Image (spheres, grey):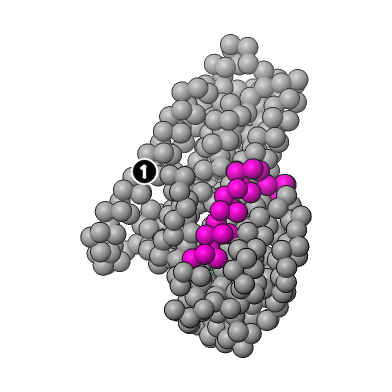
């Protein structure tokens, strides 16, 4: 096995609190193993521009563990989806003697990682997204902090709703997934939670709000996932019209991506950063670091992306048919487990609303 001499680290896609903790851990693990570490600025765009920044010593990544955003910055780079640019990026890595890459982001970033691996640059992915929408892992860096931000914001909204006996419909992020909405909905004591994964009973929710008001409830909170596009604002006006309760709409938006990372995000990002560099050292490539049932593991990126598409119903019958029997058993079990987790949270949200 060829000794690893120099690695590149980049962050890509939407930033997530904890990405800096990941960068720090990945770089320090490299340095501890006498491997040179380079930060690649602004995701794949920076890679194509050869925009590298040497991390010469552990102090170069000091005092970033508590900071949000990403010190390597992030970007979306459409060009990188084309083979021509993937080849160019691999050549830039070779020219700079970078013989391993670690990329932190969401499933788009992993598509880039697998393409870079295919061009001969061993690449490892680390899940960094507030959405927790990567099917192969229970945990993604940033999810916990984003949810805590939602709690903090919605608790404040509840204060004013309580004073004025109003309702507030809050739209939270998550792209097409309702994980942030569902878990924060339970944690803020929402009167209703609407997510894309389960049909929302609007009439039932309005009846419940009327009942709660009749029983003396003043402040009412409804959480809606952005995975139901433009629904939150519409729901707010329907609630006001049907119940007579003054109802405001609030989109929390990008505030959810900021803020000092929580303990859970710092811890998991540190574990994942170490695991990513150690995977490269062990000669692995084209894998994504995951945390399932509390344990760090790595999964083949294509397998992880296939599972993701299977879960999201994006695979054709022909594509499903070529999955090996062994992988199919694992994928079906994983999809079943994730669906039942969502159903159980939804049941709890409704039971104790
Ligand atoms: P995320 O990683 O959070 O899912 P994006 O979907 O925006 O965010 O993807 C981040 C970046 O990953 C893109 O801007 C692009 O550079 C790269 N990427 C996305 N899809 C592909 C693809 N099919 N092939 C190569 N690179 C891709
Ligand atoms: O993937 C993270 C995320 O914040 C999603 O929750 C949201 O849908 C999207 O990124 C917003 O993207 P942008 O930063 O391009 O507005």
Q: Is mark 1 within 8 Å of ligand 1?
A: no
Q: Position of residue 13 (x, y in %)?
A: 61, 63
Please name whichever residue, 194 or 75, is drawn nearer the observer in this view of the structure. Answer: 75
Secondary structure mostly seen in magenta is helix
> Would you name the residue on which mark 1 appears?
337
Where residue 299 appears, x then y in whole percent?
41, 61
Q: Position of residue 325 (x, y in %)?
A: 23, 60
Which quadrant would residue 166 be assigned to in this image? Answer: top right
Tell me: 279 left or right of 318: right
At a point 55% along the width and 65% down the height, the residue shown is 277
The residue range painted magenta reads 255-279
Residue 108 in view here: no
Quadrant of the rendering where the N terminus is positioned: bottom left
User: Residue at 75% across / 20% down in the picture?
Assistant: 163
Considering only vertical position in the picture, is 222 above or below 149? above
Q: In front here: 49 or 39? A: 39
**With respect to residue 183, does 216 lie above or below?**
above
**Closest to the observer, 330 or 98:** 98
SS for callout 1: helix
Residue 224 quadrant: top right
- When the figure is inspected, residue 98 is found, relative to residue 221, above or below; the finding is below
Answer few, some or many: residues within 10 Å of disc 1's Cα (few below 14, many 20 plus, some between 14 and 19). few
Residue 61 on image: x %, y %:
73, 62
């Amino acid at each position: 096995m060829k000794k690893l001499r120099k690695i590149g680290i980049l962050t890509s896609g939407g930033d997530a609190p904890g990405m800096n903790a990941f960068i720090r851990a990945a770089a320090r693990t490299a340095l501890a193993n006498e491997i040179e570490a380079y930060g690649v600025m602004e995701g794949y765009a920076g890679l194509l521009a050869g925009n590298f920044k040497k991390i010469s010593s552990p102090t170069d990544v000091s005092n970033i563990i508590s900071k949000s955003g990403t010190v390597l910055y992030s970007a979306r780079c459409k060009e990188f989806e084309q083979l021509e640019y993937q080849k160019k990026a691999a050549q830039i890595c070779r020219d700079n003697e970078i013989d391993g890459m670690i990329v932190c982001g969401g499933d788009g970033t992993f598509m880039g990682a697998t393409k870079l691996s295919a061009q001969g640059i061993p690449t490892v992915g680390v899940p960094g997204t507030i959405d927790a929408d990567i099917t192969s892992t229970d945990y993604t860096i940033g999810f916990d902090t984003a949810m805590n931000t939602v709690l903090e914001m919605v608790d404040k909204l509840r204060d004013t709703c309580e004073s004025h006996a109003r309702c507030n419909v809050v739209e939270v992020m998550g792209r097409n997934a309702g994980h942030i909405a569902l878990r924060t909905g339970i944690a803020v004591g929402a009167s209703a939670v609407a997510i894309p994964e389960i049909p929302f009973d609007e009439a039932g929710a309005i009846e419940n709000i009327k009942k709660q008001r009749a029983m003396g409830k003043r402040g009412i909170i409804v959480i809606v996932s952005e995975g139901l596009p433009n629904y939150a604002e519409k729901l707010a006006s329907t609630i006001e019209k049907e119940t007579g309760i003054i109802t405001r709409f609030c989109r929390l938006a990008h505030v959810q991506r900021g803020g000092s990372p929580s303990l859970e995000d710092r811890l998991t990002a540190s574990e994942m950063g170490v695991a990513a560099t150690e995977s490269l050292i062990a000669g692995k490539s084209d894998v994504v670091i995951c945390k399932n049932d509390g344990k760090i593991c790595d999964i083949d990126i294509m397998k992880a992306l296939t599972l993701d598409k299977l879960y999201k119903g994006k695979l054709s019958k022909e594509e499903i048919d070529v999955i090996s029997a062994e992988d199919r058993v694992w994928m079906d079990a994983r999809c079943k487990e994730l669906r039942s987790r969502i159903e159980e949270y939804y049941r709890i949200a409704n039971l104790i609303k």
